[in-house]
Amino acid sequence: MRTLLKGGGVVSGRGVRRADVLIDGEKIVQVGRGLSAAGENVVDVSGMLLFPGFIDAHTHFDLDVANTTTADDFTSGSRAAIRGGTTTVIDFACPNKGESLQYGLDLWHKKADGRAFCDYGFHMTIDDWNPSVEAELPAMFAQGISSFKMYLTYPAMMIGDGAIYSALKALRRLGGICGFHCENAGVIDAMIAEKKAAGELSPASHPQTRPPYLEAEAVSRLLRIAQAADSPVIIVHLTNRQALEEAESARKRGQKVYVETCPQYLVLDDSVYFNEDFSAAARYVCAPPIRAKEEQTYLWRGLKRGLIQTVSTDHCAFTLEQKEVGRGDFTKIPGGLPGVEARG
Ligand SMILES: [Zn+2]
């Protein structure tokens, strides 16, 4: 059955133009003015805008984390994506430390295959680095995994500067690329210990223990490691001016750096954490945290000037009941926000 969308405004990288769109099965076969409606299933879309399907390159569906599992699996998450106009998501296959990459990839196929309403692909987390993980890399590429993620924070995930350097070199040889969660680990842990000692355990302590400059420090360090490895990198969920300046400095010395930010950093500010009502504040706990209002200006400007290349959501949803476990200790609040539906 062919479907003809008639009378809409087609949005592309070159702007909006009036055109009809003819679809055969899942394929757009013709775009143009006054296409013949004979024999087609015609849908009148006059006055509406027709966008290409959006891609959300950063989601976490059905992820076991913080002693719980994210509220959205591939069924509910992909349904939300479609509602917002996103037709492809790229989720993160996450083997735990000690598990093989193949185990992680098989597990993610089990979670996603036959359960998703939209198209999907996977990046893969590297949270362990040793000869057997390195030996598995070519097999991952053969199965379609060419983008990876590493962490500069979280003891369960981080692999250390030396391992990042070696992993980047290995990925470069294979033509892959890696995204990085950039926050300083040690100082953040020390600041958390201070808050705990002072009995300041509400969500308000969350942004105070993860300041923007400790994100910028990790971005700076990562980019120097990438310089040593002569490798392009992606900074995921970048939140602030100082971190963006580090990316710009690296570009000025000739490095290839891609930057992603997320809607929560573009439209929300850190006043969300200073709500007396625990639930109201805890729902916004994510890392890096939502920043002070003035940072939004720099992110929007960065997008406009092409210093930031992608807006993905880092969709990682938890119910308010799940967030409850952190009442009395902000470090136990499962970190993450939904976004895959709202972004479109
Ligand atoms: Zn993420």
Image (cartoon, helix red, strand yellow):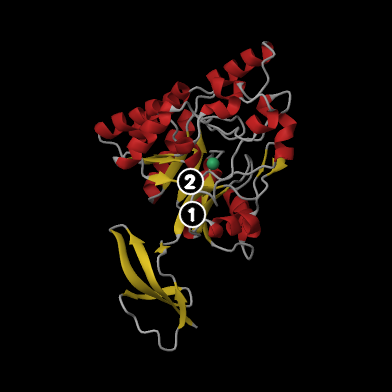
Q: Tell me: 253 left or right of 330.
A: left
- Where 55 sits versus 205, above or below? below
For disc 1, the neighbor class at 10 Å (few under 14, some 14 to 19, many from 20) is some
Query: Which three-letter amino acid code belongs to the residue tagged 2?
Result: Phe
At x 56% / y 39%, what residue is drawn?
127
Local secondary structure at mark 2: strand
Kindly report the distance in space between the C-alpha atoms of the residues bearing marks 2 and 1: 8 Å
- Where 329 sits versus 84, above or below? above
Residue 42 vs residue 190, the one in the foreground: 42
- Where 206 sits versus 324, above or below? above
**Residue 148 location (% of width, % of height):** 48, 46
For disc 2, the neighbor class at 10 Å (few under 14, some 14 to 19, many from 20) is many
At x 29% / y 36%, what residue is drawn?
255
Residue denoted by label 2: 148
Query: Which three-letter amino acid code belongs to the residue tagged 1?
Result: Ile
Report ligand 1 position as a quadrant: top right
**Residue 284 location (% of width, % of height):** 60, 34
**Residue 16 location (% of width, % of height):** 31, 61
Residue denoted by label 1: 145
At x 72% / y 41%, what residue is drawn?
68
Label 2 residue near ligand 1, CB within 8 Å: no
